[in-house]
Amino acid sequence: MRIGQGFDVHAFGAGDHVMLGGVRVPHTHGLVAHSDGDVVIHALCDALLGALALGDIGRHFPPTDPRWKDVGSRHFLLHCAALMIEHGYALANADLTVVCERPRIGPHAQAMRENLAADMGCAVGDVSVKATTTEQLGFTGRGEGIAAFAVVLLERRRPAIAVEPADPPALRELVARVEPDA
Ligand code: MG
């Protein structure tokens, strides 16, 4: 078994919604980012990559790489899930915490769990999405941005296979399942 943890922050900027766990959540602000700023998925990707000791999200999805230009963060998650599978692991469980005062996360947590489970090929019951505020303290408390923490546990399912380059047909097939976000 292997454990991984991830953390991400994005600042609020102009906009009328935020993407969290692949769910479009209406809000008075958007999130400033090269991508869609989905802190939940970015933290989860870093946790998966960390468990596999494969570096971090910035190394795998540099903003300068045209392959990742204008794609939704769910593509990142599919890519990380494919790396997990190729290395012989399956998700045991993932536990996520979203930190912000607004928007309210609770009403969207179930939809996020369903998205994340679908992209990682696991049961919804293996993915937890929690939320907390920081009692109006710090940058999240002042409403300047959103933070997310992720922890994953991976179980070995079979011997690892060679994965260089990490872009096999099966991965492209997986990635093709998700439409770029509007
Ligand atoms: Mg990020």
Image: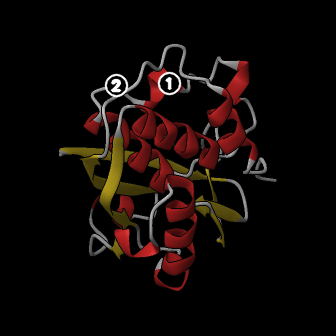
When the figure is inspected, residue 157 is found, relative to residue 162, above or below; the finding is below
Q: Position of residue 110 (x, y in %)?
A: 51, 80
Give me the residue at 64% from left, 39% from top. Answer: 35
* In this view, 64 is above or below 118: above
Pointers 2 and 1 in contact (CB under 8 A)?
yes
Q: Could you say which disc has been placed on residue 132 in the image? A: none
Taking the view exactly as shown, the residue that stands out farthest to the top is 164
Label 2 sits on a secondary structure element that is loop
Determine whether, in the image, residue 15 is placed left or right of residue 138.
Answer: right
Q: Quadrant of residue 66?
A: top right
Identity of the residue drawn at 26% across and 38% down: 51
Q: Would you name the residue on which mark 1 appears?
A: 60
Q: Is residue 8 left or right of residue 110?
A: left
User: Dot 2 corresponds to which residue?
Assistant: 54
x and y, in percent, of residue 25 in the image: 64, 71
Front residue of 170/45: it is 170
Q: Is residue 82 above or below residue 146?
A: above
Locate residue 20 relative to residue 27 in the image: left or right: left
Observer-nearest of 137 and 155: 155
Amino acid bearing label 1:
His
Q: Is residue 106 visible?
A: yes
Residue 18, located in which quarter of the rendered image?
Answer: bottom right
Position of residue 62 measured from the top left corner of the image (x, y, whole percent) = 56, 22
Q: Is residue 129 visible?
A: no
Residue type at the position of mark 2: Leu
